[in-house]
Amino acid sequence: MFDYVPKEILPLGFFFFFCSVIGIAGNFVMLMCSFRTKRFRSPCYILITVTCLADAIHISGQFPFCVHLFGNLLDSFWVLTQLENIFGIHRISVSDINFFKNLIKSLTTKPTSVTVTSTQAQCFYMLTVPLIGLTSGGPLILSMGIDRLIAVKYPTRYRIIQDEPKLYIFVQLLFPMAYAVIFLIYGFLVRDTNVKNQIICANPLALNGTAFQMFTYSSGVIYVFVFIVYLTVYLLLKNNKASARFKSVFRSLAVTVGLVMFGWVSTTTANTLSYSISDTPYTAQLIQMYAGITVNAAAASNVFVFYSINSEYREVIKALFGMKSKANSPAFEASSTMVTVKSDANLQKRRSTILSSKSVVPIIN
């Protein structure tokens, strides 16, 4: 059935297909959570939502790869179905059906050599939108870390920021948007339009040559800053008693960032070494595609991480699927206007409209 698909690529096709379906569905659930409750309308939750959107767009870029990989198989089944629907098995003999099947199989089966699908330029055009999600993912994680750092380090100022959340969110999104636009322009300028250079279209190959190398190196620099920022927040939280809600959100982000960083470290290492390991372009491209497994798995895991760790997301997700949930009670929404903090002196509750002292960590997310 899959004789025309190179054996070294076939596992990638299955993984990316199921990972993309699960990832897009999961990140769509995360997006729906932000519309389901007012709790998730604060800057931190909006940044989480935008990041999930970017991840969904990113992994949607694997569908062209799957379509190109399994395209012949799908075409064969589609033509067979149309023939049987038009003529009907009862109108022609079984031998005629077998004749058509063998004819179609001989016309559509590709050789076992490397499957070629498109030029690199065509791949870039097809994956322009997924590239936005791919390139903005790292900067968005950095923006979420900076948001948590501001909340812990400058709680009073962070409360004031809540009065102008649109401007604050716009500033936080400036770098991710600029980073994505820069690589879209760079990728367009260095695209390969030579029709003789055919490739299997996949996310890593949408950026050609130096554009992909610069993206790899700059991503490494970004994730160094991500590590520093999140480590700083963690150390500050150890010395500053924050609310359980604040810690729950940060813990969810920390696990997600850990998965993504592991994915990007392995991917960046493999991408960097791919050209030195082999002089064959096809082998280097194959290494880059396999290296993307960890990154795509991390992008698809958001809903599972937040459901497991964050009780608020868990309750809202339950409500979305019609299950018994605290999110269906008025108290769930009302409690979002309350700020529960732990000071060094005692535990106390204050309303979010009251400015807390600098020794208090806000839980406005």
Image: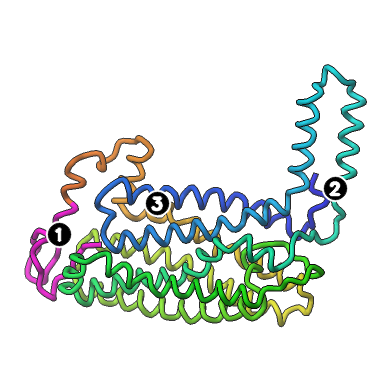
- Image side of residue 56 versus residue 248, left or right: right
Which kind of residue does numbered mark 3 sit on? Met
Q: Are marks 2 and 3 in contact (CB under 8 Å)?
A: no
> Which residue is the site of mark 1?
339
Q: Which residue appears at 61% of the width and 78% of the height?
A: 211
**For the C terminus, which image quadrant?**
bottom left
Front in this rendered view, residue 345 or 95: 95
Q: Is residue 248 above or below residue 160?
A: above
Which kind of residue does numbered mark 2 sit on? Thr
Count of number-bearing discs: 3
- Image side of residue 172 versus residue 72, left or right: left
Q: Are marks 2 and 1 in contact (CB under 8 Å)?
A: no
Q: Which residue appears at 62% of the width and 53% of the height?
A: 63
10 Å crowding of disc 3: few (<14), some (14-19), many (20+): many
Task: Report helix, strand or loop for mark 2.
Answer: loop
> Which residue is the site of mark 3?
30
10 Å crowding of disc 2: few (<14), some (14-19), many (20+): some
Q: Is residue 362 magenta?
A: yes
- Image side of residue 348 versus residue 162, left or right: left
Q: CA distance from mark 2 to mark 3?
A: 41 Å
Task: Report helix, strand or loop for mark 3.
Answer: helix
Segment tinted magenta in the rendering: 336-365
Numbered badge on residue 272? none
Q: Earlier in the sequence, mark 1 or mark 3?
A: 3
> Which residue is the site of mark 2?
109
